[in-house]
Structures are given as C-alpha cells and as structure tokens.
Image (tube, rainbow, N blue to C red):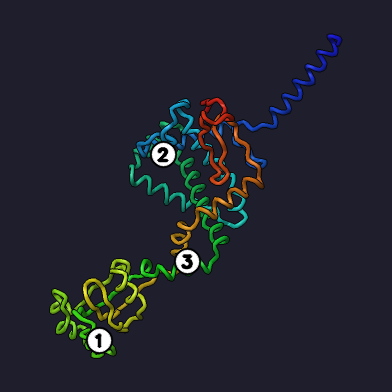
Amino acid sequence: MSLRRSASLALVALALAGCAGMNRPEVARVGERDVSDAELRHAVALQKVLADLQGAPCGGQPTAEEPAGLACQRAALSTELLWLGVRDYAEEHDLTASTADAEQAVAGLEAQVGEDGLAQALSARGVTRDDLLELGRRILTENAVRRAVTEERVGTDEIRAQYEQRAAEFTTVDADHILLASKAEAEDVYRRVRGATREEFDAEARKSSTEPGAKSSGGRLGSNPASGYVPEFAQAVVALEPGEVSRPVQTQFGWHVIYLVDKQVTPFEDVKPQLLDPLSTEPFQAWLEERAEDLGVEVDPRFGRFRPSRFSVEAARSTDPDAPEPSASA
C-alpha cells in the first residue's frame, strides 16, 4: 500500500472517529436533549447546597471503590435526567409548577436554616436563590407528573374508594357521648335520646354516663380529628350527620351513644395528592421505563449505570464485568 493511500485512510478514520465523538453526549442524552458538563457542574453545586444545609454527604455515602464526588455527581445527574424525562408531559398537561409555589417551598427551607444561613450556603457553592427556586419548581412539577400518571393508571374510582375508606383521616368532628357499662344499658339510653336535642342529650349524659367528669362536662368531647378516636368510635361518628344520635357502639372503653354536633370534611380534590402518593411507586416507575424506551437515554458510563424505572444513575459495582473505570470529572 502506498504512503499516500495510507495517509488518506488514516484521515478518513480520524474523520469517522470525530463524527462518532460528536454523536456521543458530553454527559448524558434524553431524546434529543443533552446534559452538558456545564449543566452537570451547576446541578452538582445545587446538590451540595442541599447537602450542606442538611449536614449530610452529597449523594449519600460513596462506595469505597469510587473517587470522592462521584456519588454527588450521580445524584445531580439523576435530577437532570428525571427532569428531561417528565418535562414534555408536564408542558402538554399544564402541570408545570408556578414560581409562587417554588417560592413557598424555598421560603420553608429558609425558615428552617435562616435567611443568612441559606444565603451563605448558596454563595459558598456559587449559585443563587433563583437557581434554587428553579430546582424547587422542577421538583414540584415532577411530583405533579407523578400524581397525574398515577391517577391515569390507577383510576379515579379507585382513588375515591380510598378516600371513602379513610374518611376518618379527613374529617373533624364535634361530638358528645354517653358511656355505659353494658349493651342493655346503652340500648335503654339510646331509646331515650335518639330524637333528643343537644341539651337533652347532655342532660342524659350527666345523669347516666359512667365517664369520669361527665356530670360536669355533659359528655362533650369538643372538636377533634375523627382519626384520633379508636376505630369503632371513629367509624360511627363519621357516619352521622349533625344532630343525629348513633346506635350503641362498643369500644375497649365500654358502650357509647354518640351525638354529632358538627363535622367538617376535607374535600376529595384537596386530599387527592395525599391519596395518590402512597399508590404512585409502581405506576410511575412503569411509566418512566416506557419513557426511557420511547426517548432513548444515553449516559456516559464513567458516572454509572442508568436505571430506567427511576430515570436515575446508580453505581456500577466492580463485580460487574461490564462496569467502567470510575472517574470524577465534574
């Protein structure tokens, strides 16, 4: 082969290698969006701020076999990947958190560590309060996407059934009661008070109740979360409407006849996030796996191994024959 031909082939090989390098992301790629070294450094700085404020190592304890800082890079990179995984869905479904919501979240953190403490932590890592606000907005948006996906996959009927089953948790009641030693006594009292006014009920409580202090209190329990009572009492009192009297209810304390004065029930829509969160793990992880497949995710192996079900990067162990050499570059 001639020297000229060898040189030409070498140039072609270099050109192809250069093109291949251009196709690889600096750090990671989700769909058509890249995470650059600069973006990762910025994300690491924010993770370090949060770790500083918590007094904890950034990214948790690193493995013994990896260089310092790699666990923090993985945590930061994972936040970037998850955001790129959910962002389009959030925009399409109008779920992006507002700046006001993010401000409220940051203000809560600021209240814990103090205004000066937060300002010093941000300055030490070269980031600003606006940077922290943007991170807060992303986290709130991710939570909104998690709940929306869960509701889609679990179904509103199932969520509402959960709401009804856990009614005591979302109900505050103002109730009076009469405590009796036996069912027969309770049935007898119930017959006398089932159509009573509150004053008539309380008068019966002063006369018949075995509860200590009933003679002065009239059996009044005041306003309390229904979930604060034993389950049998809570179930009975939640089923009443104001002005109604329950049939005798047995608990570990004896037999109760209950008069409901008032109740306040938190609306379904207000507690839906609380209901969705415990149900979200499996549906959301399945959705993330589908997103990872649809979008295509590439992660530079020096940071670890991509886990689709969490859209995160986990440590590659040395026992894994495919594990890359660990490196800390950001």
Q: Residue under circle 3?
A: 269
Which of disc 3 and disc 2 is earlier in sequence?
2
Q: Residue under circle 2?
A: 50
- The mark closer to the camera, 3 or 1, is 1
Q: Amino acid at mark 1?
A: Glu
Q: What residue appears at the point 53 percent right and 69 percent down from the top-left corner?
A: 157
What separation in Å lies between label 1 and label 2 (alpha carbons)? 60 Å
Decide if residue 145 is in sight here: no
Q: Amino acid at mark 2?
A: Leu
Q: Secondary structure at mark 2?
A: helix
Against 33, is 105 above or below?
below
Image position of 83 (left or right of 7): left
Q: Secondary structure at mark 1?
A: helix
Residue 323 in the image: state x and y as whole percent.
56, 29
Residue 101 in the image: state x and y as whole percent.
46, 53
Q: Amino acid at mark 3?
A: Glu
Q: Secondary structure at mark 3?
A: helix
